[in-house]
Amino acid sequence: MKKKIIGNLCLRVDKVKWENWPYPTFTYLDIGSVDRESKRVSETAVLNPNEAPSRAKQIVRAGDVIISTVRPNLNAVAVLRESRNPRIASTGFCVLRPDPQFLEARYLFYFARTEAFISYLMLNATGASYPAVSTKTVSSAKMPLPPLEEQRRIVEILDAAQALIDQRK
């Protein structure tokens, strides 16, 4: 199967301009927000724009896949679900917004959990005690890309398997 560069399969993610921010509050996602075990966002803070940390820059939405760029061996990844409050992610994440013409979000999410992807990140990480990768490194990774219908079938199977794993826990 032909491999494609992940970044070429994703849409651009906007950066926040606080002077134009129309909402009184936002939900801030930092690295600690992702539960590495469940691969879900769990701990968040609701802040007003005046409290925004300097790393709060990326406007995220449902369907985005967030991948921690620090300590990639820990595989802190999640696919975002719907939220009532607008969300801003730390620059400590690579935010991937799959282009629905080519890529299913959950297919990308499951790929980001593979040993091959984690190994690629570790091979390209810098820093010994606190390894990190750039967004460019994450976006440059190659992944197998079956047709959308096949991606959906794979996601159904993996979702069912994950549901069984969660049930057993």
Image: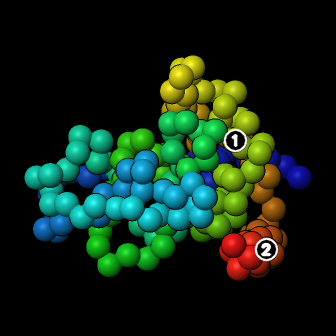
Which amino acid, by three-letter code, is at mark 2?
Ala
Mark 1: which secondary structure?
A: helix
Q: Quadrant of the C terminus?
A: bottom right
Q: Which residue is mark 1?
A: 118
Q: Which label was assigned to residue 161? A: 2
Q: Residues within 10 Å of mark 1 (few under 14, many from 20)?
A: some
Residue found 13% across the figure and 68% down from its top = 24
Q: Are marks 1 and 2 in contact (CB under 8 Å)?
A: no
Viewer-closest of 47 and 104:
47
- Residue 92 occupies quadrant: top left
Percent position (x, y) of residue 44?
34, 62
Q: Colour scheme of this structure image?
A: rainbow
Q: CA distance from mark 1 to mark 2?
A: 21 Å
**Left or right of residue 15: residue 97:** right
**Left or right of residue 101: residue 91:** left
Position of residue 94 relative to residue 44, above or below, is above
Q: Is residue 159 visible?
A: no
Residue found 29% across the figure and 68% down from its top = 86
Residue found 66% across the figure and 52% down from its top = 112
Which amino acid, by three-letter code, is at mark 1?
Ile
Residue found 77% across the figure and 45% down from its top = 115
* Mark closer to the chain start, 1 or 2: 1
Position of residue 77 relative to residue 130, above or below, is below
- Residue 78 occupies quadrant: bottom right
Q: Residues within 10 Å of mark 2 (few under 14, many from 20)?
A: few
Percent position (x, y) of residue 113?
69, 53
Viewer-closest of 71 and 2:
71
